[in-house]
Amino acid sequence: MNRYAHITGWGISVPDGLLTNDDIAQMVDTSDEWILSRTGIRQRYIAGDGQSTATLGADAALQALEVARVSPNDVDLIIVSTSSPEHIFPATASLVQDRIGAGKAGAFDLSAACTGFIIALNMAAQAIRTGSIETALVLGAETLSRLVNWEDRTTCILFGDGAGAFVLQASEEPGGVLSAVMRSDGSGGDLLTVPAGGSKLPTSPETIQDGLHYIQMNGREVFRFATRVMKQATEEAAEQAGMTLDEVNWIIPHQANQRIIETAARRLKIPMERVVVNLDRFGNTSTASIPLAAVEAIQDGRVKPGDQIVFVGFGAGLTWGAVAAQWTGPLPEEKRVVWPYRFYTLYQVYTRLRSLVLRFVRFVEGVIWGRRR
Ligand code: COA
């Protein structure tokens, strides 16, 4: 019996802090006209105090679980794709797991920059298809504003914060994630990088003074690379899934730059009416951008059950990839209402208390075992 990995839930979370192009023009030598004409971006949202990759991710995850009508306790695996994790370790995925109270889930972070959501989707789908798990949460979550040099006009105009989540569930009905293409070319690693803060160049007063803890980018080279690989990955993923490009209802690309997306669509001979774009309002949210665009298109009724979709991404690494999927929506058998979503605030109090109790038990155990030694 074949098993399929269906996308049965979806959610997004965007911080409150709106930053327009005019606001950025107050900070660096640029203009709304320059940013809009070169990138298509009008505004982006920036995380404020108390908001971070894990808080945005957890909000998106709970919404996605609510749509799928799945309890956090039924989640087997959480993958958080991010380039702006809470810490080097622990994994942001573990912090999301704690925040949503997913007591039985494994959790790990996936680092493949803006392509990460594509790869995470494929990894979760593979785990479901092999029968190793039933239900996965796949997140793209970023607060890249914390890695941006707000004095560098070549990068600070591009990025925004946000998170998106999909629930994937096993089913014997054909559909869901059907194929995937994953590629990398590390020889271009220096084209888009945060040089310091890792093992090669640990943070030091010198790295901070030289601004090496900020995003650095060769914009022109990234642009050239992106337009080339998007066509190739989209065609390969569609072909592997047995779709012709004419049969693909929607291309949902990584939202980096309007001109990159238009060039790729032109090369694919796909009209822009079949391409989902929302970067004008969110900027480049890196690995969160594909779910942010997808969820908007589902919520406003553009994407319908049965639609064939290619998600395509590219980014630092260099990395690129695509996933072809058939959209289905929540599984028909999942009719129950799951209690966390009826009493959302109460549930959040419960997960915080749960976390506190676990910490307290660990503390008490530590005292007891410490005394015995
Ligand atoms: N405002 C005004 N002028 C700016 C500017 C800004 N924000 N940023 C750069 N410029 C200037 C440059 O200094 C340069 O001036 P010069 O000709 O006097 O030297 C000029 O504009 C052209 O710079 P260039 O880098 O060639 O611009 P561009 O047309 O390539 O656009 C990007 C720059 C970054 C918008 C574009 O290269 C891009 O989008 N690349 C892809 C980046 C991306 O998507 N990264 C994420 C991938 S996941």
Image: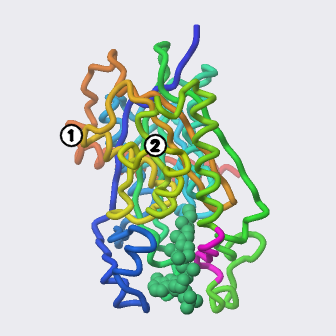
Where is residue 198 shown, x and y percent of the image? 71, 70
93 over 238 or under it: above or below: below
Mark 1 close to ligand 1, CB under 8 Å: no
Which numbered disc covers residue 213? none
User: Farthest left residue?
Assistant: 342
330 lies above or below 350: above
Judge whether residue 150 can be spotted in this image: no
- Which residue is tagged 2? 251
Give the side of residue 30 with respect to residue 16, left or right: right
Along the viewing direction, whichever of 46 and 241 lies nearer the viewer: 241
Looking at the picture, how far across and down is residue 292, in whole percent?
39, 51
For label 2, the crowd category at 10 Å Cα-Cα, with few meaning under 14, some 14 to 19 and many 20 or more, is many
Can residue 25 be spotted in the picture?
Answer: yes
Q: Label 1 sits on what residue type?
A: Phe
Q: Is residue 163 above or below residue 328?
A: below
Mark 1 → mark 2, Cα distance in angstroms? 36 Å
Q: How is the image coloured?
A: rainbow
Q: Earlier in the sequence, mark 1 or mark 2?
A: 2
Q: Quadrant of residue 48?
A: bottom left
Mark in front: 1 vs 2: 2
Q: Look at the image and give the residue range highlighted in magenta.
A: 212-221
**In magenta segment, residue 213:** yes
Locate residue 121, reporting x and y percent: 54, 39
User: Tag on residue 343?
Assistant: 1
Classify residue 350 by image quadrant: top left
Q: Which residue type does callout 2 highlight?
A: Ile
Query: Tag 2, which secondary structure?
Result: strand
Residue 250 position (above or below residue 337): below
Q: Residue at x 35, y 46 (%)?
A: 273
